[in-house]
Image: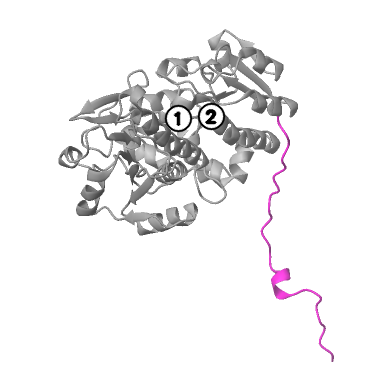
Amino acid sequence: MSKSISPFTREQLLPQEETLEIFKKKGNLFIGIPKETYFQEKRVCLTPDAVSALVSNGHRVMIEAGAGDGANFKDRTYSEAGAEITKDTAKVYSCPIILKVEPPSLDEIKLINPQTLLISALQLKTQSKKYFETLATKRITALAFEFIKDDDGSYPAVRSLSEIAGTASILIAAELLSNINGGNGLMFGNISGVPPTEVVIIGAGTVGEFAARSAIGMGANVKIFDNSITKLRSVQSHLGRTLYTSTLQPKNLIKALKRCDVAIGAVRGTNRAPVVVTEAMVDCMKTGAVIIDVSIDMGGCFETSEVTTHDKPTFEYNGIVHYCVPNIPARYSRTASVSISNMFTPYLLKIGEDGGIENALRFDRGLKNGLYFYHGILTSKLVANWFDLKYSDVNLLIF
């Protein structure tokens, strides 16, 4: 008797789990952009070109009158791009999606409707427990744009603003060294027969890299310090040239600080920037030298640093000029606004294409990384640990 041969394999005959197909259905977004009220904040989330792209894709954008003035984008330009302009702040905050640079204040949260999607910076270190409790009562879904990840694992918003801060730190230093600002009268340019300006950069991250790029482009002699050999190697690779690099050894750092004309502090920490340059080290620097402490938003990496403002950005300590403004990108509000807008626009279009924020979060892990509230439920372990709050795993809420 011949043995019958089945056309199916053993694995095919076993029970298989059913997969549920999720269909994407394009949705139309209604985005509200209120005017920024935070002190000296002049940036805006979307440029008129970005608004035009969103409107042409069937979405609505409502902007509070004057929201783009700080970045030199006029209401008329937004209106011509298809945005709806209103002077009614409450009307803007009633939109289903709120887009902001700075996190909304407690008074502004009161204007937001329940179940709204809020996209803004989180700025965890400036928040209070009450802030998150208020968001929870409104059942808000909130995304922190500084925690959104790209496909390569980087943070696009942080990198963009760091690039601006790094480049700006050198431009600011060049201004402060000029006679017109009471400086030593030194010029960054590598003039024949004139020794180049000496720049010390502490921190080899994105800020340090772009500060070095700008300083080298202006003809300065650059020295970079960082305790990460990988970062130092990466900077040299990205700049495409060999330059002076060193770990943070006090002997080498003091020697460099004694000779430098400009010192850039760009070191980050987990909770606070480490104090790398002590008061005694600052005392060794040349009279008229300039310190730009980009890390001041995390406490500063120079012991002598104190927070300053855009209105009064500098102070002197023992003849050393200190520039310690926390929000450097706001100094170049138009460039910073274009940079932020370039990041926001693709994500907003994607949310629309996916049929809403729920589907977008399912399909995009990088976007999900920026989520810290989902319909009033805290989903960020970082926030929960910081303020001793309960949180839920986002993967258990979004299937």
Q: Are marks 1 and 2 in contact (CB under 8 Å)?
A: yes
Is residue 254 at least partly visible in the picture?
Answer: yes
State the residue at coordinates (20%, 30%). Answer: 319
**Relative image position of residue 149 (x, y in whole percent):** 52, 44
Q: Nearer the viewer, residue 74 or 34?
A: 74
Q: Is residue 134 above or below residue 243?
A: above
The part of the image, by quadrant, that contains residue 245 is: bottom left
Tag 1's secondary structure?
Answer: helix
Is residue 100 at least partly visible in the picture?
Answer: no
Q: Which residues are magenta?
A: 1-28
Q: Residue furthest top?
A: 87
Residue 192's mark?
none
Q: Which residue is mark 2?
A: 335
Classify residue 290 as left or right of residue 83. Answer: left
The part of the image, by quadrant, that contains residue 229 is: bottom left
Q: Nearer the viewer, residue 126 or 19?
A: 126
Q: Residue furthest front?
A: 193
Disc on the earlier residue, 1 or 2: 1
Q: Which residue is mark 1?
A: 329
Name the amino acid, label 1: Pro
**Relative image position of residue 313 (x, y in whole percent):** 33, 23
Local crowd size for mark 1, using a 10 Å CA cut-off: few (<14), some (14–19), many (≥20): many
What is the C-alpha distance between the residues marked 1 and 2?
A: 8 Å
State the residue at coordinates (35%, 47%). Answer: 203
**Relative image position of residue 138 (x, y in whole percent):** 48, 22
State the residue at coordinates (64%, 23%). Answer: 48
Residue 322 lies in magenta, yes or no? no
